Each structure stands twice: as C-alpha cells, then as structure tokens.
Image (cartoon, helix red, strand yellow):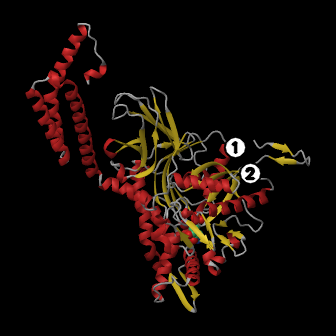
Amino acid sequence: MAKIGINIATGSLQQSEMIVGIDLGTTNSLVAIIHPETKLPTALKEFDGSSIVPSVVHFDSFGNVEVGEQAKPFLESDPQNTIFSAKRLMGKSHQDIRAHQDFFAYKIIDDNRDSLVKVQVGSTFYSPIDLSSYILAELKKRAEHILKTPVTKAVITVPAYFNDTQRQATRDAGKLAGLDVLRIINEPTAASLAYGLGMDPSEEKTIAVYDLGGGTFDISILKISNGLFEVLSTNGDTYLGGDDLDRAIIQYWMKQMGLDDLEDHKLLKQQLRLAAEKAKIVLSTQEFFETEFAGEKISITRQIFETLIEPIVQNTMDCCARAMKDAGLQIADINTVLMVGGSTRVPLVKKSVATFFNQEVNDSVNPDEVVALGAAVQADILAGNNQSMLLLDITPLSLGIETMGGLMDVLLPRNAKIPTQAARQYTTQKDAQTGINIAVYQGERDLVKDNRPLGAFTLKGIPSMPAGLPKVEVRFLINADGILQVSAKELRSGVSQTVDIKPQYGLTDEEVEQRLLDSLTNAKADISMRALVEARTEGEQMLSVTEKFMMKNAALLTKDEISLTASAMQALQLAITMEDKHLIQAKTEELNDISRPFAERVMDQAISGALKGKGIEDKDLQ
Ligand code: AMP
C-alpha cells in the first residue's frame, strides 16, 4: 500500500517515497517503477517518450559533465573525453582489459596505486565507480523530475556473472549518486519477473533467459514453482554483446576500404563505430544497408552480416549448452525461452536460440526495458507490496578455503542458492599454534593455486593447545546481493573474527568460463595431485608423531627398535621427496606397522605405572 504523508512546512500532500528499479546497462540504462494506478511495471519516460539513457558520460574542459543523450554526440566529436561502456571496466584491473583496450577510444590507465583501472580525462582520473555514479545520478534526477518526488532508494541489476568486487562497485556507485541500494539482483532474474512469471502460485515452469545486451551475455536457467524463483544454473561471457557485432562490421568495412589501422584517427574510428551500429540495427529489419564514410560509399547485406557474426552467435549457443548441462536438464525440459537485451532483435540470434531450444522464443516484452521492469517488480516486493514472491539466486563458482598442502576445501559449491551459509570445522597442525590463516578462494580446481584468491585473514589469539585440539569453525555467509562474509571462531575459547571479502580486482572476462572449462579438462590431473598432496600430508604427520614419540620414549626401546624405526622414517622421507604417491602410502604404512607395537607397549607400561599410583599425563602418551 502506498502511504500518503503531509509536508509539515507546506501543508501539501506528499506521496510516500518510491523504490525504483534501475537497469545500469553497458550501452543503455533506464529506470522503472510499478505504476501507482495500473500496478504494472512501467519504464519512466520523459515527455519526448524516451525512457533510455545512453550509458555515456562526457567531460568538457570547463569541468562540466553531461550524461546520456547529450553526451552521445561527443563520441564522435570529442572521443577522448567521452566515456562509453564504463560497465565493462567495473572491478577490473588494467591487466584484465589490456586485450580489449583497442575498443575504448578514451584513455584507460593503471596509476600503480591500486590494481583497478582509472579513466584519464584531461588531468583528472575517474574510477569506473565514479563514471557509473554519474549515470546513476542522471537516472535519479530524471526519475525525480518525472515522478515529482525525491528518489533515494533503488534496486539495481547486474549481469549474473558479476563477481563480488563488481557487485560492490555497483553498490558504491549507487551510494555516490545518493541512492540507497536496497538490493543488487541478476539481470536474468529481473527479466523473468518482468514477464510476470511465478505470479500464479500453482504455476510450475522451467525457463531459459537468453540475454544479449550491448556488452554482456548471460544465459540463465530458472525454475519457478510456488511463486519461488530458483536459478538452476547460469553461464555467459561478460565480454560478448552487441558491441562485438558492431566490431565485426567495422573490421569488414576496414578490410573493404583497405584500412589496417585507425589507431591514430580516433575521430574516424568513432564515426565508423556509430555507422556500424546503425547498419546492424537496420539489418534487423532490412536486407541491405549503405552509408558514406570519409567520402566513400560503404555497404553491407544481411547475408554477409550473418556470416560475420555466426561465430559470435555460436559462442552464445555453447554457453547455453553448458548452462543446460549444469542444470542437469534436457532441451525438452525448458517450457519457455525469454529474450532479453537489444541484441536479441538480430534475426540470426532469434533463429539460433529458437533452433537450440527447439521452440518459438518469447520476446513480447520490450527487450531494452525488460530488465528495468523486473527490477521495479523486485523493488515492489521489497516495499512490502507483493509478499507472495521470494527470490533465490545462485553462486556462479565454488567458494572455499586453503587447507594443508595448498588444497581447495569447498564450503559452498558452485550454483549454491543464495542467500546461503555453510560452516565447517578445522584444527591446528602444530602444538601451541595461536593463529590460523584463512585464505578464501573461488574456483573449481583442486589446488588453490589454480583458483582465484578472494582474500585472506588470520584468526589470532587462539589459546595455546596441542595440535588438533582447537576447533576452528569457518563460516561462509553470502547475503542476498551475492556478497561473501567469512568468519572464523575457535569454539573452545570463543575467539572470533569476521571479514567481508572484497577482492582486489575482478576476474578477467573470459576467466569465469575458462575456469569452468579448466576444471573439466584438468579433472584427472587434479584428482591425482590431490591424492599426492593428501598422501604427503599424512606421511609428514606420521613422521612428526613418530619423531616426538622417539624423543620422549627412546629409553623404553631397544637399540634395534630405534634403528629399525629410524630407517623406516628415512625411507618415508625419501618417498615424500620423490613425490610418489604409492611409495609414500606404502612407506607410511610400513612406519606405522613398525612403530605401533612400540607405542602400544609404552602405553601399557604407562597404564600399569598409573595403576601403581604414579599418574600419567595425556601428553606423555603422544
Ligand atoms: P542493451 O544493453 O540491452 O541496451 O542492448 C543494447 C545493444 O542492443 C546495443 O549493442 C544495440 O546496438 C543493440 N540493438 C538495439 N536495437 C537493435 C536492433 N534493432 N537490432 C540489433 N541490435 C540492436
């Protein structure tokens, strides 16, 4: 229910504050609300009917900032000072975007102060968060202008593949723009909400959301039942979108014109980019496009365009196949396919998706608005106006910590539903160990060195105890935004520590996908490596326990027994050095067989000693 308030100063009636839904897109952004009268999700439109704000920011030499449609012409006339596709830089290091640097007409720098990129305009440096905040501030201003009420609360969408850093960066951008970001949700999840799916509690459906926007591609498989949205799997590529289709046309034209490089002609490059986008849009409804560029006529047919973009479209279909495999589903299990993002207007894209899923695709909601409309539906749920719906999202990669020998111990498997939490107990390796290092990783490989480090901290102040006695519980908590909180607590003493994991920089764009592929191709090697590490750890523990035993109890053993044990220890040490799993296991077993009877004998003597009233201490048995 919308509440009505009274402004005490003016005595006028005020509408209660609205929570808006924002699609902060790579190419375009927009705001939507649930219309107070029709109760339908509605994109906010200016008087001229435009709802879309191009995600473009222009800085002039006087320090003025223009955003959106006003900034767009400067893409051609002042490319160095006009920033587009800033979303692609969110949470990225210079290393991450080096391969794609050509795409940006403005200056991206690595200022060596932190690992995240900055954009240099004149003598000022802007972070991608700053740039996104300009776009969000413009959206806020527009919304306030249209709604005639302050707008301070929002739900913002991000691609499903956005990692923690990128989600946090989006949230920070909102904060900078004066918005309280109540929730960050995945774009495909928002899209399914916009299609009104799940409103009928008796409805059971499995849907695929194919989202090809300006700069990102996501495929999500969702299950809807009892008004509950559950994401079964996600896949995609944060560097694949309409921009790449434009680039295919640019390259084709450059070849046609015999141009190798437009690096030194930023203005021409920008002009060609805009012409290519125009060609692509025209070819969505027509068979032929022609224009003039630098005094020459350039043209392209739909057939040639389709040949050029076929590999790009095929890439997205490969992602679809992987998402289906992860969800454990067959094509026939998919009831509905939703099309999202401006690039799904390309006929070849529609046709390929329909062929893959063996059904007509559903594109009845405007693909440019659908994500923002869904964000508005989520905002309405958060405002308490629609309590019958709940949202579940998932983690795209497994999360875990490093254990002995550099092994990855997964606490939250990939595709775990969020919000979620998991806890596991660990212990110390050394006597009187007062600190334990918790290193958090993301990825599918068995060794942490092959996964992505998210952060690390040390739980300090554990009271001095023998190895193996402290009980350290490590807990992972992922909140509804997909942000990870890790805590560690020593249960005997209550010593605890909690950290929000905010990694230094994000994954490179193909990396999430590459990591999944790697985990499949390296599965066999990983398993044998894990087995070796486990055998080695066990062997080392056996050596350390035996050594301690020998030092304490040498007096109770014969000379032969001592030399037999020493040579078995040497043999095990050698096997460990040779990294031979079978040999390590055999030698561990041998040492165990030799030392066990001695240990039992020493134990018997200690017990009989105790019976005689001498008393024993636990540690003497070790
Ligand atoms: P989005 O990120 O969803 O706003 O999508 C923007 C992308 O859609 C840009 O790459 C646009 O060039 C592209 N786009 C918009 N309209 C069309 C169209 N009619 N045909 C093909 N691509 C389009």
Going from the N terminus, do you reach mark 2 or mark 1 first? 2
Q: Amino acid at mark 1?
A: Ala
Where the C terminus falls, by quadrant? top left
Question: Can residue 154 be spotted in the picture?
Answer: yes
- Expressed as whole percent of the image width and height from the top left, the position of residue 586 reads 15, 38
Q: Amino acid at mark 2?
A: Thr
Q: Furthest-top residue in view? A: 612
Label 2 element class: loop
Q: Name which quarter of the figure residue 612 lies in.
A: top left
Looking at the image, is 389 positioned above or below residue 489? below
Looking at the image, is 350 positioned above or below residue 460? below
- In the picture of the structure, the residue carrying the numbered disc 2 is 38
- In the picture of the structure, the residue carrying the numbered disc 1 is 383
Where the N terminus falls, by quadrant? top right
Query: In percent of the image, x 57 and y 52: which residue is there?
Result: 168
Q: Nearer the viewer, residue 597 or 612?
A: 612
Q: Quadrant of ligand 1?
A: bottom right
- Expressed as whole percent of the image width and height from the top left, the position of residue 483 reads 54, 47
Looking at the image, is 98 positioned above or below residue 321? below
- Expressed as whole percent of the image width and height from the top left, the position of residue 41 reads 68, 53
**How many residues crowd around disc 1 within 10 Å: few (fewer than 14), some, or many (20 or more)?**
some
Query: In percent of the image, x 53 and y 58: which residue is there?
Result: 91
